[in-house]
Image (cartoon, rainbow, N blue to C red):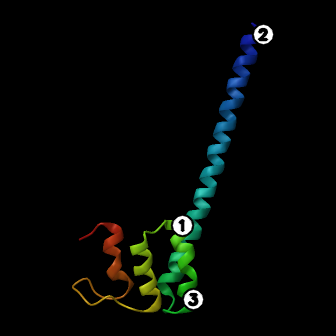
């Protein structure tokens, strides 16, 4: 009987440890999302130039951009636009490639 009680206590403690680990991961995720939000807002509202360029490595790392996405974002940061089309110009013209909107 004693062994069963200890076994139950061990299971309970392991369960509690897993719950606490999940909570820690959730907190990290929320902090990362808040940081990403702030970086993206800075990128959007800054004028093109070196300040935007400085944010590119952060955005690239956090969003794990493809080489094509990274080069498009770099062009936006420099103030270059890849032609004009029906989608408009500026950074908003690239949102379709990330959102799946055609």
Q: Is residue 38 visible?
A: no
* Secondary structure of residue under mark 2: helix
Where residue 4 sits, quadrant-wise, is top right
Which is nearer the N-term, disc 1 or disc 3?
3
Q: Which mark is residue 62?
A: 1
Where residue 76 sits, quadrant-wise, is bottom left
* Secondary structure of residue under mark 3: helix
* Secondary structure of residue under mark 1: helix
The image shows residue 60, relative to residue 24, as above or below, that is: below
| Whole-number angstrom distance, CA of label 2 to CA of label 3 | 65 Å
Residue projecting furthest to the front: 67
What residue sits right under mark 2 in the picture?
Answer: 2
Which is nearer the N-term, disc 1 or disc 2?
2
Dot 3 alpha-carbon crowd within 10 angstroms: few under 14, some 14 to 19, many 20 or more: some
Comparing labels 2 and 3, the label whose residue is closer to the camera:
3
* Residue at screen point 57% across, 88% down: 51
Residue 28 x/y as whole percent: 63, 57
- Compare residues 32 and 82 and report the one nearer the observer: 82
């Amino acid at each position: 009987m004693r062994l069963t009680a200890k076994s139950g206590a061990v299971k309970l403690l392991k369960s509690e440890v897993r719950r606490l680990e999940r909570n820690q991961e959730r907190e990290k995720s929320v902090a990362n999302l808040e940081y990403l939000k702030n970086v993206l807002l800075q990128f959007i509202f800054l004028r093109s130039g070196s300040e935007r360029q400085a944010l590119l490595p952060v955005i690239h790392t956090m969003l794990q951009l493809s080489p094509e996405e990274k080069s498009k974002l770099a062009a936006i940061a420099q103030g270059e636009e890849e032609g004009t089309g029906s989608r408009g110009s500026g950074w908003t013209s690239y949102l379709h490639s990330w959102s799946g909107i055609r």
